[in-house]
């Protein structure tokens, strides 16, 4: 089952409100991401700054009528804010095992002549080398930098 993905540009003053609206409209997930490659450095204590150009993305089940969903989101936004949404980018996203899909991007990495960092779901490329079986994740990051 594919998902309906709505991506809507927002500024820091409206992103949270737009996130709440998409959840109220039945989104299964909502995320925010940088729309302009703007770094956010260490924020001041107690603050959660957003990018000056943020994209708010909502995922909806595919049994919804896409045109009506966009109309409903626009109307609800206008009722709440008296403003219009500039654009809504609609994409159908194929469903997959997202908990495992990220693993496709990680392969064994060689350092020097004999050291390999190998994710546990791969075989060691050189069984005679020093193979460190280490999965990318929260504790060790991705290892790509």
Image (cartoon, helix red, strand yellow):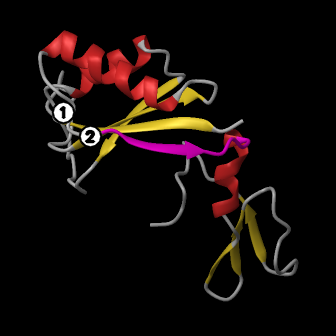
How many residues crowd around disc 1 within 10 Å: few (fewer than 14), some, or many (20 or more)?
few
Image quarter in which the N terminus is found: top right
Whole-percent x and y of residue 93?
59, 44
Q: Residue at x 76, y 70 (%)?
A: 131
Q: Residue 107, labelled with which disc?
A: none
Q: Is residue 102 above or below residue 28?
A: below
Q: Residue at x 49, y 45 (%)?
A: 91
SS of the residue under disc 1:
loop
| 2 and 1 marks in contact (CB < 8 Å) | no
First of labels 2, 1 by sequence position: 1
How many residues crowd around disc 2 within 10 Å: few (fewer than 14), some, or many (20 or more)?
few
The residue that disc 1 covers is 49
Of residues 69 and 139, the one nearer the viewer is 69
User: Residue 111 lies in magenta, yes or no?
Assistant: no
Compared across the picture, whether 15 is left or right of 104 comes to: left
Q: What are the residue bounds of the magenta stretch? A: 88-97
Compared across the picture, whether 61 is left or right of 37 comes to: right
As measured in the structure, the alpha-carbon distance from the residue carrying label 2 to the one carrying label 1 is 23 Å
> In front of the other: label 2 or label 1?
2
Q: Residue 87, labelled with which disc?
A: 2
SS of the residue under disc 2:
loop
């Amino acid at each position: 089952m594919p998902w309906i993905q709505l991506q809507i540009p927002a500024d820091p003053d409206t992103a949270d409100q737009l996130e709440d609206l998409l959840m109220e409209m039945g989104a299964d997930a909502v995320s925010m991401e940088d729309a302009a490659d703007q770094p956010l450095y260490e924020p001041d204590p107690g603050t959660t700054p957003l990018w000056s150009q943020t994209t708010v993305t909502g995922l909806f089940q595919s049994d919804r009528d896409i045109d009506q969903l966009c109309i409903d989101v626009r109307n609800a936004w206008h009722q709440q804010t008296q403003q219009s949404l500039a654009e809504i980018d609609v994409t159908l996203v194929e469903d997959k095992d997202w908990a495992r899909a990220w693993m496709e991007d990680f392969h064994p990495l060689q350092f020097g002549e004999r050291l390999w960092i190998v994710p546990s779901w791969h075989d060691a490329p050189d069984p005679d080398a020093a193979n460190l079986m280490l999965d990318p994740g929260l504790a060790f990051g991705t290892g790509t930098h």
